[in-house]
DNA sequence: CGACTAATTGGCTAAAATACCAAATAGTCA
DNA sequence: TGACTATTTGGTATTTTAGCCAATTAGTCG
């Protein structure tokens, strides 16, 4: 494959890869309508804070979220809202999968 | 996190994970408007056919593509077109990233 | 049937991702 | 300044993913 095309798809894949983890999808959902601090997310997720922080840095690195420090806390918010549209599509895939499975059984 | 919610996000992540690879993104693009056989994709990608086949099986497993065997060849097509909408959003993220980087430099 | 072609599967190794703990940073406040 | 809190960073063990080769499966055609 043409190296220029290759790096184009690599850049896209990096963004999608950032979303490709249950915890990170959860985070995106949670900060979609309102920013949250790491401590809040940590509570909701129930993992080590360092783990949550690293997930957030993956998302930030990909440009999906942005952060702002206020006092001791760092607040994260969704930087590119169109990502939420994706979720509807994914649900559609899952629904289609379930239907196909049902059809295969009958 | 509540185990039911957890498995919900796991299911979503599986679909997104299937997309989270440059080669697989390329494949989705290529079969978006017209089905292609493995041999065509192999030529375009320039990897071992077994590699391409495994990428395709990841996509199929996630429910993103469907396949149909005709004669010796197996043709793959996009099963859920709404995934294409995602690409526009991703391009938006990349553009925003580039702009942010430019702004940081000046 | 036997040679041939398209595709998938199994096996293996190398590279990347994940999650925890411990240590370092940065900001607050007495 | 020193104690305290929120977050990030470094290190490491474990798991997952990727890609190639070799072997197998499935369909075609003489």
Image: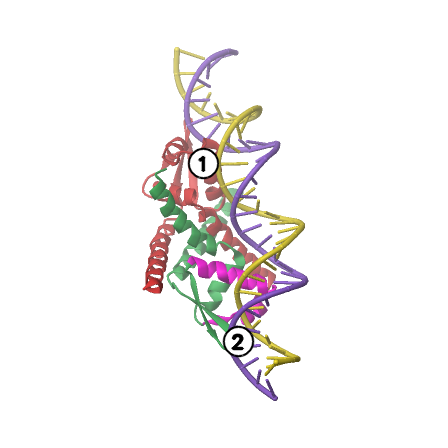
Chain colours: A red, B green, C yellow, D purple
- Looking at the picture, how far across and down is residue D12, in whole percent? 61, 33
Q: Residue at x 52, y 60 (%)?
A: B55
Where residue D1 sits: x, y (%)? 52, 11
Residue A84 locus on image (x, y percent): 35, 50
Mark 2 is surrounded, within 10 Å at the Cα level, by few (under 14), some (14 to 19) or many (20 or more) other residues, namely few
Quickly name the residue at label 2. Answer: B72
Q: Position of residue B69 (x, y in %)?
A: 47, 73
Q: Quadrant of the C terminus of chain A?
A: bottom left
Which residue bears the numbered disc 1?
A: A52
- The quarter holding residue A96 reads bottom left
Which one is nearer the viewer's eye here, D9 or A42? A42
Q: CA distance from mark 1 to mark 2?
A: 48 Å
Q: For the stretch drawn in magenta, what is the main secondary structure?
A: helix
- Image quarter hosting the N terminus of chain A: bottom right
Of the two numbered discs 1 and 2 in the rendering, the one whose residue sits closer to the viewer: 2
Taking the magenta stretch, the answer to whether it contains residue A64 is no
Residue drawn where x is 57% and y is 59% of the image: A6
Q: Is residue B75 visible?
A: yes
**In the image: residue A86, left or right of residue D3:** left
Q: Residue at x 48, y 32 (%)?
A: A50
Write the start and end of the magenta stretch as one range: B35-62
Q: Chain of mark 2?
A: B
């Amino acid at each position: 494959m043409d190296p220029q095309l290759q790096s184009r798809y690599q850049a896209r894949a990096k963004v999608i890869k950032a979303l490709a983890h249950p915890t990170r999808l959860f985070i995106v959902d949670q900060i979609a309508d309102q920013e949250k601090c790491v401590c809040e997310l940590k509570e909701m997720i129930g993992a080590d804070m360092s783990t949550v922080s690293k997930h957030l840095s993956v998302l930030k690195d990909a440009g999906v979220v942005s952060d702002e420090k206020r006092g001791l806390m760092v607040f994260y918010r969704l930087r590119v809202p169109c990502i939420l549209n994706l979720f509807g599509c994914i649900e559609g895939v899952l629904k289609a999968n379930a239907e196909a499975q049902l059809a295969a059984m009958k």
